[in-house]
Image (cartoon, rainbow, N blue to C red):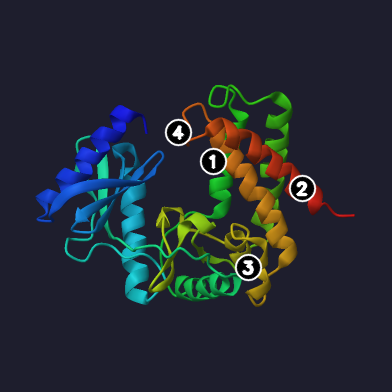
Amino acid sequence: MEPSELRRAVEAGWATASGLGLQVDDVVVVHDSDRVALRLVPCDVLVRVAPVEQLAESEFEVEVARRLTVAGAPVAELEPRVEPRVHVRGDFAVSLWTYYEPLGSEIAAADYADAFLRHHAVLRRIDLDAPHVTDRVAAALREVNDRERSPELPDSDRELLSDTLSGLRTALSVERAGEQLLHGESHPGNLLNTRRGPLFVDLATCCRGPVEFDLAHAPEDVAQHYTGADHDLIHRCRALNWAMFSAWRWRRDDRMPDRGHWRVEGLSRVRAALDRHEPS
């Protein structure tokens, strides 16, 4: 967020928690992007603050978290001392979560895969209205194909992203067997290493599709520990993930920190994924 917007987001998080009876003496910014995560002390609560335009997305995330927690999924839980809902404070949507002190060690591939297996098992039992992964691909494709929405995207790169997104979207539309609810964006930044074990966070990306779409977000060695995974599909989904990531970075209104670096890096990752797993 811009500095002025970040200050207002911090004030909204602070005021919301204080108004709910939680003691807040200080705020630590844990993550700052299009929405922010704040650690409040000494009540030790994690507050997620998003622009009010993302209210529906925040409400969906809270509902997903509530349902998955009850079912025993390895996910970060909502703050139990307050009502599990999204609060609107000025221009922001505010939700309150349990804060987990992160462990310093990296999550081993086998443990990452085990978290996936347990998470996917619970997701198969949940009846939840969620978009299909191809809906997300279509949204990314609209950004790429609309020059007004991505005016700085070079023509050759626009063609690369458009071809990759449309081609892989078609492939996933055809291959619907074995689909289920997914995390949707299960990269290492969204799997916390905690004293309770690995826990998935950022649940607003929940969607429907093949488990290989989730596995493609993880380090490559994780899939070796996930029984029954289709490794060819994982490779294709990895190219798709980087193409969607790149599409978001070239949006005119993208707010990701260091966007210039990630624009270049994302396109490089798309090409590498396509070159590496291109049929011989």
Determine the residue positioned at 30% across, 61% down. Answer: 99
Front label number (2 vs 4): 4
Residue nearest the observer in this picture, 203 or 109: 109
Residue nearest the observer in this picture, 223 or 195: 195
Disc 4: CA contacts within 10 A as few (<14), some (14-19) or many (>=20): some
- The residue labelled by disc 4 is 255
**1 or 3: tag closer to the N-terminus:** 1
Amino acid at pointer 2: Leu
Disc 4 + disc 3, Cβ < 8 Å: no
- The residue labelled by disc 1 is 139
Amino acid at pointer 1: Ala
Find residue 24 and report its horizontal and vertical position in percent.
15, 51
Find residue 53 and report its horizontal and vertical position in percent.
33, 37
Q: Calculate the distance from the C-alpha at mark 4 to the C-alpha at mark 1.
A: 17 Å
Disc 3: CA contacts within 10 A as few (<14), some (14-19) or many (>=20): some
Give the image quarter of residue 199.
bottom left
- The residue labelled by disc 2 is 274
Disc 2 + disc 1, Cβ < 8 Å: no
